[in-house]
Amino acid sequence: MTDRAGRTAIITGANSGIGLETAVALARQGTHVVIAVRNAARGAAAVADIAARTGTDTVEQMPLDLASIASIRSFAAAWLERDEPLHVLVNNAGLLMRARTTTADGFETTFGVNHLGHFLLTGLLRDALVATGEGARVVTVSSGAHRGARHGLDFDDLMWERRRYSGFGMGAYCASKLANVMFTRALARRLEGTGVTANALHPGFVGSNFAREGDGGRLGDVGMRLLRPFALSPAKGALTSIHLASSPLVAGVSGEYFVKCAVADVTKWARDDAACDRLWDVSRDLVGL
């Protein structure tokens, strides 16, 4: 087992699913884990679960709602006030919405949470990661669903105001997962020379609570139950996140997309550096970073 004693990791959405399993694995390595969650009761239950399964007390929760710029800024401010090193940021939280809704700041929810929320969080914590220096890592959970955005991102309608929000919200979801990969590639270039790496990943189809907690409606609950027998367990789905967050085998590797702990290809849209930079600039303006 890799020894990561003395290191600190922040994991978003780690109260269940692959985020929880990532937290368990890192805690077992000796990493101090901060789970960033929007529901305090579920967060407390997750902290207790992690402690029971690992036999450590190296885990805590902090409140974070990725659908709220104010909450993200509050979280980052609270963390920075601690003046502690940050070795790993795992942008894990994600959702899929059956119907179009908006965040507190007026963003389409899927794009707002899956991409913009993590974009802002990473930007606000960037200096902490850079101060930690060599070996610090940003890990972003994307998806093979990014391939579903067959025409790339529609920069004229990122909030899905003009297009039909159909197909169980998969169009918006695929676009948000493409944005995760594009963000990672743009971030990696901006982190060159700092010692901090940034990589994205596809966890596989995982039998977790994803799309089953009301965000996807009744159809999401039923669909996930039917597909669950064909899905990976959350523990197996977390393996690539754990690998990128802790393995010495990927030290210094940056700007890549991983599947099953190995570098994999992405679509031509994700390889378009000009489009990645455009997404970066638009995102920065939207969140006021």
Image (tube, rainbow, N blue to C red):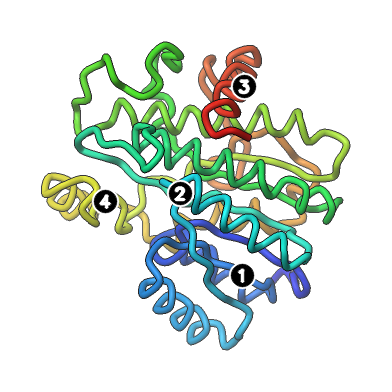
User: Where 145 falls versus 123 (above or below)?
Assistant: above
- Element assignment for label 3: helix
Residue nearest the observer in this picture, 101 or 48: 101
Q: Amino acid at mark 1?
A: Val
Q: Amino acid at mark 3?
A: Asp
Kindly indicate whether the residue at mark 3 contacts the one at mark 1 (C-beta within 8 angstroms): no
- Element assignment for label 2: loop
Residue hosting label 1? 33
Q: Residue at x 74, y 58 (%)?
A: 87
Residue hosting label 4? 230
Q: Residue at x 56, y 75 (%)?
A: 60
| CA distance for labels 4 and 3 | 39 Å
Mark 2 or mark 3: whose residue is earlier in sequence: 2
- Residue 263: x percent and y percent? 63, 36
Q: Residues within 10 Å of mark 3 (few under 14, many from 20)?
A: few
Q: In the image, which is nearer the foreground, mark 2 or mark 1?
A: 2
Mark 2 or mark 1: whose residue is earlier in sequence: 1
Q: Is residue 145 visible?
A: yes
- Element assignment for label 4: helix
Q: Amino acid at mark 4?
A: Phe
| CA distance for labels 2 and 3 | 19 Å
Q: In the image, which is nearer the foreground, mark 4 or mark 3?
A: 3
Residue hosting label 2? 66
Q: In the image, which is nearer the foreground, mark 4 or mark 2?
A: 2
| CA distance for labels 1 and 3 | 31 Å
User: Which quarter of the image is occupied by the N terminus?
Assistant: bottom right
Kindly indicate whether the residue at mark 2 contacts the one at mark 4 (C-beta within 8 angstroms): no
Residue nearest the observer in this picture, 154 or 161: 161
- Residue 11: x percent and y percent? 56, 59
| CA distance for labels 1 and 4 | 30 Å
Q: Amino acid at mark 2?
A: Leu
Residue hosting label 3? 281
